[in-house]
């Protein structure tokens, strides 16, 4: 048995696909969790909404990596702000990503 199979058995099957969590198990959907993610990370959600997003990202293997990435990004941004400036390398990487996103028509 693979490690993820063991976890699925322990916590209940988590199927593939974006909106797999919802009213049937009392959890908010992946889309709803993503919509609230930045407010969650900034501590700007009401207590009940915060708890819903927290519960979702704790068990959703599709949303948890994005949550981790965004949290680490915000931590790095805050650390750079505390130092007073971002490194030239970080600034160049961010500008490159923004330019690529703009060229691809993404928002």
Image: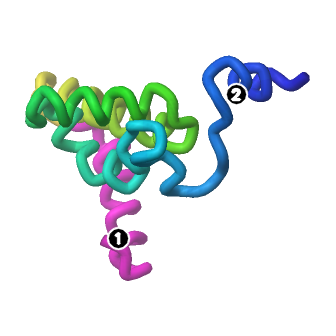
The stretch in magenta equals 86-107
Horizontal side, residue 78 vs residue 30: left or right: left
Q: Nearer the viewer, mark 2 or mark 1?
A: 2
Locate the N terminus and report the quarter of the image it occupies.
top right
Residue depicted at x 48% and y 35%:
64
Residue 70 in percent (x, y) is at: 35, 39
Give the dominant element type of the magenta stretch: helix, strand or loop.
helix
Judge whether residue 93 is colored magenta.
Answer: yes
Locate the C terminus and report the quarter of the image it occupies.
bottom left
Q: Which residue is mark 1?
A: 99
Q: Earlier in the sequence, mark 2 or mark 1?
A: 2
Residue 16 or residue 88, whichever sits in front: 16
> Looking at the image, is 54 positioned above or below residue 88?
above
Task: Kindly report the distance in space between the C-alpha atoms of the residues bearing marks 2 and 1.
Answer: 40 Å
Residue 86 or residue 1, whichever sits in front: 1
Q: Is residue 41 visible?
A: yes
Name the residue furthest right.
1
Residue 87 or residue 62, whichever sits in front: 62
Residue depicted at x 51% and y 36%:
60
Q: Which residue is mark 2?
A: 8
Give SS at disc 1: helix
């Amino acid at each position: 048995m693979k490690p993820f199979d063991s976890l699925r058995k322990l916590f209940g099957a988590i199927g593939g696909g974006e909106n797999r969590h919802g009213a049937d198990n009392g959890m908010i959907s992946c889309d709803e969790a993503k919509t609230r993610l930045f407010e969650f990370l900034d501590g700007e959600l009401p207590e009940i909404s915060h708890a819903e997003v927290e519960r979702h990202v704790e068990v959703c293997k599709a949303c948890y990596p994005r949550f981790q990435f965004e949290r680490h990004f915000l931590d790095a941004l805050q650390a750079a702000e505390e130092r007073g400036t971002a490194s030239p390398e970080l600034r160049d990487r961010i500008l490159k990503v923004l330019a690529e996103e703009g060229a691809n028509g993404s928002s």
